[in-house]
Image: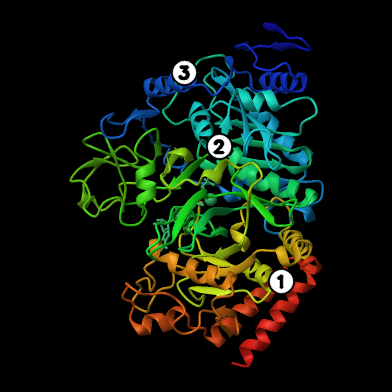
């Protein structure tokens, strides 16, 4: 029994502990409570220092969890291989825990909070035996900023600690801001593999501890997250999807702001004018790539502010202000190469954690799409020998890199502006081989919300399940909205009303339309700047566009395709709207809306009626 005396409180814990880094009695009491439940061997209070980083990486290299990469090729970088069954977010194990099921809504798994705690308590009891419990304070957004929020993650995964240090403002400064009168989010994470069994015998550790039983639970009413059994990505870095989206979306609704699955960029025109654009696409549908875009249109510049999450709040001047609450990228590796995303390639020169990619004979990383020619031999993401003709992928499709945003060569100086940047346009998108045009401007805020609410997208490897299957993913938020999705749509409508003519314009984009032969019709990546250029010209009133049934598309000749070769037939197909297929989608939208009953805002039902009548008139 270790007893620590602090100014306000006495920690009674079975665990030995390092010096607590706070005198905040609420924090101390909470840490004690979690330690009593999970029974770690030692409590480590993270300060976010470089020496802490070095000690943890050394420890994980010794344990075999991390492989150091060749210092000459990829300095300060490591490879982690997860358990082959712990490779993505587990949406069917993700729960919103609220008193009433209707508050979670039909698109979330739901549990009554007390019932879930009853399930979780035995799982967490003793779950950290033999392990170190880390107390990880962090700030989402600049520490102390007006839009920022604070949190603490308790975890038994040093891998999660390292990732949290890259992804958030983690450390002592954040802890110092958690005072008795600040609101902060309590998150608890255990990989669920104690090193001492019930009989008191020790168990050998493995390189990637996890548990077959997984629970990712959000408690919006008490600002808590409890995550059990997984060490991967959004399941384990609780600042990210659990806090910054699921919990924050509930906070945002209460306080009149928005927590969104959006990238954020600053765009500068040849005339030197700045614009800020946010875009919501589902997981693995191009946010990181658009955030790091190198424009192919001469004279334009794009700078990166965020690649995954944006918090949007009306500013004192009435504009909608946006911040990136994160401090790093947890980016999809496959498909990232110098030909598609050179900015990402230049960002990951070093100080990067790679997860589930392949290891080359030179001690560097590789994944499908990184180079045109694969290495002749590598160790694949499961640790097996690999050659190009082994018939297997070298990297897992959801393999990732974790890198500080400050290493991004195109990072905007505004990335850490605590007041946020004013938004000029919001883009909604998805991965659609058919039907959805390359770009469409909404006819009004309400129409824009309708577009966001009805997005469907082909499923990707970012979540467990069948890749390619079409599913509704409103606002790219299907797995991330912490409350009833229909109420979320109402909140968006209300935000538009209060923003009035200061509201950003809303557009729909689709980089993924395919021809009958299965090839992408649009070159994408840097050439998406052509679409951004048209969007800015619309914002400035410099392009007329052409109104069709589904919205406003570029008029003939308005989209700048100078310097790329797109057959005229492909251009036509990129914007083709088939009224029959669209009317069929309207029927599906009816079915989709039906599950929300009378919570569907009337404005959205009216939008559906309007769309149908415009399509029928085609
Ligand atoms: P999450 O981190 O899961 O939220 O994903 P994300 O939305 O940031 O997606 P990301 O930019 O990582 O892209 C996912 C995949 O889509 C990668 O394999 C990219 O190469 C591919 N991709 C991105 N942009 C484009 C594009 O414009 N055209 C095509 N064809 N593919 C793209
Ligand atoms: C996503 O799936 O949208 C991601 C990766 O950005 S994860 O952190 O796992 O959520
Ligand atoms: Mn994401």
Relative horizontal placement of residue 152, taking residue 80 as reference (left or right): right
Foreground pick, 346 / 330: 346
Q: Secondary structure at mark 2?
A: helix
From the top left corner, tell me how far across and down residue 231 is, in percent.
Answer: 51, 35
Image quarter in which the C terminus is found: bottom right
Please rate how many residues cluster around mark 1, counting C-alpha atoms within 10 Å: few if below 14, some from 14 to 19, many from 20: many
Q: Nearer the viewer, residue 320 or 7?
A: 320
Q: Is residue 74 left or right of residue 8?
A: left
Residue behind mark 2 = 236
Answer with mark 2 or mark 3, whichever residue precedes in sequence.
3
Q: Is mark 3 within 8 Å of ligand 2?
A: no
Judged from the image, the secondary structure of the residue bearing numbered disc 3 is helix
Numbered tag placed on residue 446 in the rendering: 1
Q: Badge 3 is on which residue?
A: 51
Q: Nearer the viewer, mark 2 or mark 3?
A: 3
Residue 579 x/y as whole percent = 56, 87
Cα separation between marks 2 and 1: 36 Å
Image location of residue 511, percent across then percent down: 45, 67
């Amino acid at each position: 029994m270790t007893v620590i005396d602090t100014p306000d409180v006495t920690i009674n814990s079975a665990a030995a502990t390092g010096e607590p880094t706070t005198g905040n009695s609420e924090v101390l009491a909470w840490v004690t409570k979690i330690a009593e439940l999970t029974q770690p061997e030692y409590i480590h209070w993270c300060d976010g220092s470089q020496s802490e980083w070095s000690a943890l990486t050394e420890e994980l290299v010794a344990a075999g969890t991390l492989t150091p990469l060749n210092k000459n090729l990829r300095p300060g970088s490591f490879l982690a291989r997860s358990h082959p069954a712990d490779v993505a977010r587990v949406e069917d194990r993700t729960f919103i825990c609220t008193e009433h099921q209707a508050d979670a809504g039909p698109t979330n798994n739901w549990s009554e909070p007390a019932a879930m705690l009853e399930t979780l308590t035995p799982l967490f009891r003793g779950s950290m035996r033999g392990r170190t419990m880390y107390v990880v304070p962090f700030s989402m957004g600049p520490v102390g900023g007006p839009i920022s929020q604070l949190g603490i993650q308790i975890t038994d995964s040093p891998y999660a600690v390292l990732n949290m240090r890259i992804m958030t403002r983690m450390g002592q400064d954040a802890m110092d801001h958690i005072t008795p009168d600040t609101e902060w989010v309590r998150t608890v994470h255990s990989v669920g593999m104690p090193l001492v069994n019930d009989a008191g015998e020790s168990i050998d550790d493995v390189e990637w501890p996890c548990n077959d039983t997984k629970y990712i639970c959000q408690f919006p009413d008490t600002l808590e997250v409890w995550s059990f059994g997984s060490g991967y990505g959004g399941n384990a870095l609780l600042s990210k999807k659990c806090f910054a989206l699921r919990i924050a979306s509930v906070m945002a609704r209460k306080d009149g702001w928005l927590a969104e699955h959006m990238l954020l960029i600053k765009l500068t025109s040849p005339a030197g004018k700045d614009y800020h654009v946010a875009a919501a696409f589902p997981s693995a549908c191009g946010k990181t790539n658009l955030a790091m875009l190198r424009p192919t249109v001469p004279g334009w510049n794009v700078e990166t502010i965020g690649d995954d999450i944006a918090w949007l709040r009306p500013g004192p001047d009435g504009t909608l202000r946006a911040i990136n609450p994160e401090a790093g990228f947890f980016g999809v590796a496959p498909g990232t190469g110098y030909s598609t995303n050179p900015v990402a390639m230049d960002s990951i020169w070093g100080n990067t954690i790679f997860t589930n990619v392949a290891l080359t004979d030179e001690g560097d990383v590789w994944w499908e799409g990184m180079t045109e020619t694969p290495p002749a031999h590598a160790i694949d993401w499961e640790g097996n020998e690999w050659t190009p003709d082994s018939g297997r992928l070298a990297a897992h499709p959801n393999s990732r890199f974790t890198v500080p945003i400050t290493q991004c060569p195109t990072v905007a100086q505004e990335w850490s502006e605590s007041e946020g940047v004013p938004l000029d346009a919001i883009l909604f998108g998805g991965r659609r081989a058919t039907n959805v045009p390359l770009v469409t401007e909404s006819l009004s805020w309400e129409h824009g919300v309708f577009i966001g609410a009805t997005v469907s997208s082909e499923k990707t490897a970012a979540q467990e399940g069948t890749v390619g299957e079409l599913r509704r993913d409103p606002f790219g938020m299907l797995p991330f909205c912490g409350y009833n999705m229909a109420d979320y749509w109402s909140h968006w409508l209300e935000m538009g009303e209060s923003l009035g003519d200061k509201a950003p314009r809303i557009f729909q984009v689709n980089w993924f339309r395919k021809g009958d032969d299965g090839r992408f019709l649009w070159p994408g990546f840097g050439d998406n700047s052509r679409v951004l250029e048209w969007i800015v010209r619309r914002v400035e009133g410099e392009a007329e566009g052409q109104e069709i049934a589904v919205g406003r598309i570029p008029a003939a000749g308005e989209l700048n395709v100078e310097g790329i070769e797109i057959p005229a037939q492909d251009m036509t197909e990129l914007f083709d709207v088939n009224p029959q297929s669209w009317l069929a989608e309207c029927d599906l939208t009816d079915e989709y809306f039906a599950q929300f009953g009378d919570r569907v805002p009337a404005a959205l039902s009216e939008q559906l009626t309007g769309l149908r009548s415009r399509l029928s008139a085609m």
